[in-house]
Amino acid sequence: MDYMIRGIDKDKTFRIFAVKSTEVVDEARRNHQTSPTASAALGRTLTVGLMMGYMMKNDKDKLTIKINGGGPVGTILITADNKGNVKGYVDNPTADVERKASGKLDVGALVGTNGKITVIKDIGLKEPYIGTSDIVTGEIAEDLALYYFLSEQTSSAIAAGVLVNPDTSIKSAGGLIVQPLPDISDEGIKRLEDMFANMKSVSEYFDTEKDIEEIVDEIFEGFEIKITEKIPVQFNCDCSNERIDGVLVSLGKEELKKIIEEDKKAEITCTFCNKKYKYNKEQLENLMETIKKN
């Protein structure tokens, strides 16, 4: 089962977020039929997005991450909330590149490094908060850590990994965010830096039968971490017939009339989950009546 935790060290000098996201990423892969490297790129973004969404305070808050580095995959876009729900897609799901000499997936080459990360936080204010930063590596986690430093003046260590099976299904996925708190000492920062320097690849930690709490204990050996909350996570698209009705109504009377006369039907596919919504002539005419009444 996929789930996510938040925790804090006993001295309250840093906080952590960790998530196991294997099922989430595999559902995204199935929805979009992504290539192995596109699965890794989208999966890392979904994984970090879950943790960033978890940081938001209110149930109605929404987080959107948009990444476009000019690479073959095009734009990666995900949205998340603070309840463990996330959805996302890539422009070119079948795009792929050669593996690195080490045999690992070359996410950086697929994403590219000529572009920006945009983070939008809709927290109920008149205007949403929008922050941007340049993409430096295309590896997702490092670039989002740089975003935090440049746009939110927050130091964050971020790791995210996705392992793909030979049959293209997702073997494992997970991630970790560590953020120092104001009371941390220089010595505390040095200890965290040393810990991260000696960490294995995050994929290796999550490619086991261990639960997240055991993984955290392994990574933070020598620290005392208190887990303060634990929630399930899922790929959850909130598209619906009502929402798609609204999309068609928003086209306006003339455009809808044209569709009725020329095609006598319509099919709309949700970008986030690829669910198809089909309308016959009668249904389209009913929507036309809705426009006339308004």
Image: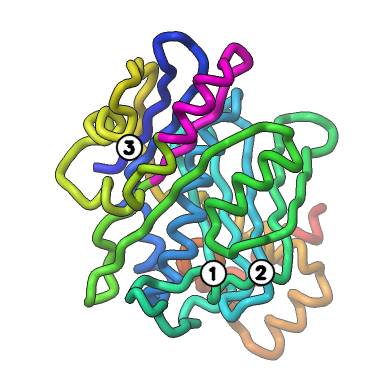
Q: Are marks 2 and 1 in contact (CB under 8 Å)?
A: yes
Q: The residue under label 2 is which amino acid type?
A: Thr
The alpha-carbon separation of the residues under discs 1 and 3 comes to: 27 Å
How far from the left and from the top, in percent, is residue 214? 22, 31
Instruction: State the residue position of label 3.
Output: 3
Q: Is residue 61 left or right of residue 211?
A: right
Q: Residue at x 58, y 36 (%)?
A: 156
The alpha-carbon separation of the residues under discs 2 and 3 comes to: 31 Å
SS under mark 3: strand
Vertical side of 181 occupied by 273: above or below: below
Of residues 77 and 190, the one drawn nearer to the viewer in this rendering: 190
Instruction: State the residue position of label 1.
Output: 108
Q: Residue at x 48, y 52 (%)?
A: 46
Of residues 96 and 88, the one drawn nearer to the viewer in this rendering: 96
Q: The residue under label 1 is which amino acid type?
A: Gly
Task: Specify the quadrant of the image occupied by residue 124.
Answer: top right
Task: Specify the quadrant of the image occupied by residue 75.
Answer: bottom right
Vertical side of 101 occupied by 50: above or below: above
Which one is earlier in the sequence, the residue at label 2 or at label 3? 3
SS under mark 1: helix
How far from the left and from the top, in percent, is residue 77? 60, 60
Q: Residue at x 26, y 36 (%)?
A: 215
Q: The residue under label 3 is which amino acid type?
A: Tyr
For the magenta stretch, what is the residue range?
A: 175-194
Which mark is drawn over residue 113? 2
Vertical side of 14 occupied by 178: above or below: below
Which one is earlier in the sequence, the residue at label 2 or at label 1? 1
